[in-house]
Amino acid sequence: MANFEEMSKQSCVPLKPPGLVLQYGTAGFRTNASLLEHVMFRMGLLATLRSKHTKAAIGVMVTASHNPEEDNGVKLIDPMGEMLNPAWEVYATQLANAELEQLLPLLEDIMKKEDIDRNLAALVFVGRDTRSSSVSLAQLVIDGVSSVGGLYKDYGLVTTPQLHYMVCCHNTKGRYGEATLEGYYSKLCQAFIELTKNTHNRTDDQKHLTVDGANGIGALKLREMERHLKKELQISLFNEGQGKLNYECGADFVKVQQKPPTGMNVNSGERCCSFDGDADRIVYYYTDPDGRFHLLDGDKIATLISTFLKELLTQAGLNLKIAVVQTAYANGSSTRYLQDTMKVIVRCTKTGVKHLHHVAQEFDTSVYFEANGHGTVLFSRAAEEKIRQLTEDVNTDDTRKQAAILLQHTINVINQTVGDAISDMLLIEAILALKGMTVQQWDAIYTDLPNRQLKVKVSDRRAIETTDAERRAVSPAGLQEAIDVLVAKYRSARSFVRPSGTEDVVRVYAEADTQESADSLAHEVSLAVYHLAGGVGEEPKPLH
């Protein structure tokens, strides 16, 4: 720690803005970029300690994902490309909020608690998105790593999932893939080309996809990847960096506003998708001949992928358990279709992909997506081994072997470390091609129940406590009973409330058989929250 002591004496360590308190959440730290200098330096320190503790490379990604351009953020990546261990999230929060004189004692305390040998080597991979603030903030991470004698590899401009991938590749000594961008592109694209080889006479129309890059890093990386696709996927790319990041474009805008991005020409029936700012979310959509907008969100994506995987596993004769992991925000129609028609296991967990990823690891094969389009597919080591053995077994009949080969290519097109818009896009495109499906046929698998999301400002979000994967409120007293009474008034209805993780608001979700009913239910539940959970400001107004 000698280097750090020297730096702190020389006042090179960025100071924490007075009174600022930040919390490390599912998405790490995220706020206005001007408030993050001290956080970046300290996350460089923490990543170095984490690397020594795990004896592995750790990732630090500088991004604020779908937030406005003036914001920024940072998240740490653990050795297998997964999100940071929850116990270390606590250390991240403590370090971010510590005064300068508390830093060294806090670092010493972490090393003592975690039994870290300070003489061990440390390696930190650093990546950043396209925000103008990301260059200097990433340098501060590097300064933090260097100040305590850690080594770093600066990947520069990468998507968040690409950095997760690099960390996993390095720490598995190449078993997962090569820890370079070229390695990432060639692994995914070769698998995609092998999958689509099995389709017949795809027309240029069927190979064509319109992509909204959210004016972010995903657009840049998609352009780099295009040559690897060998025209098997022909991309028309919009919002590739000329406009403002995430402004009136991107997956979050499309999902929330239920309309195509600004400045993108969407022809009737054309297959389109949108990434978010750091390319870890994706949603699909199209407009029909009447000009109506149709969104295919994370629920529709999970249904398409799990249907495809179940068919292949059945054809391969593999007795592997397949599950779909959702949150309370998943549309009720998707849950019913998966359970009743597809007969797959469905699990519901708290909001936040780290919760979904954790539950997904319990199964042989699992598909997890949040409704916002953030998700991926996991295969257990045992499942991958069974599939590999089947492809190599000379006594396997052709049908089973072909299904196993397709499963193997599917595994290679997926980024199992984290939700990845580029990887998910290639998987969806391959499935549609193999099944000979149009986007309209995919959309028609089931019909979403109309729904509405609202938020209510409250004096203290901690007044709301939930259970049953956030589907039931346990406090304040009387709130869940009030919601139950309101839900009973409508057909096919469901509603839940949950506190925001970052601000004093309560999020309200409602669905019912008609949009009018969903809107009314959402409003009535908002009123119940306002009156029973300490609402502030004006009473919620009806939507119509």
Image: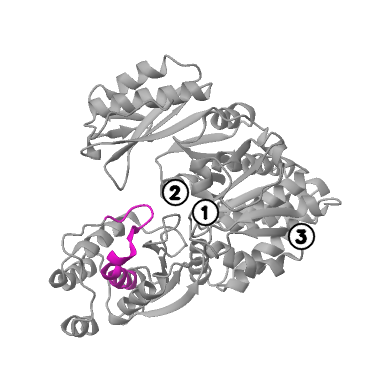
Label 3 or label 2, whichever comes before in sequence order: 3
The residue beneath circle 3 is 232
Vertical position of residue 294 compared to residue 273: above or below: above
Q: Is 209 left or right of 282, judged from the image as shown?
A: right
Residue that appears at 49% across and 30% down: 451
- SS class of the residue under badge 1? loop
The amino acid type of the residue labelled 2 equals: Val
Asked whether the residues under the numbered discs 1 and 3 touch, taking CB atoms below 8 Å apart as contact, a structural biologist would say: no
Gap between marks 3 and 2 measured at Cα: 31 Å
From this viewpoint, is residue 445 visible? yes
Question: Whole-percent x and y of residue 369?
Answer: 52, 44
Q: Is 61 left or right of 11, judged from the image as shown?
A: right
Residue that appears at 65% across and 52% down: 427
The amino acid type of the residue labelled 1 equals: Gly
Where are the magenta residues, as a range?
A: 23-48
The residue beneath circle 2 is 353
Label 1 or label 3, whichever comes before in sequence order: 3
Asked whether the residues under the numbered discs 2 and 1 touch, taking CB atoms below 8 Å apart as contact, a structural biologist would say: yes
Vertical position of residue 513 compared to residue 83: above or below: above
Dividing the picture into quarters, in which one does residue 420 lie? bottom right
Gap between marks 1 and 3 measured at Cα: 23 Å
The residue beneath circle 1 is 419
Which is nearer the eye, 311 or 215? 215
Residue that appears at 65% across and 66% down: 187
| Mark 2 Cα-neighbour bin, 10 Å: few <14, some 14–19, many ≥20 | many
- SS class of the residue under badge 2? helix
Residue 520 sits inside the magenta stretch: no
The amino acid type of the residue labelled 3 equals: Glu
Gap between marks 2 and 1 measured at Cα: 8 Å
Which is nearer the eye, 439 or 542? 542
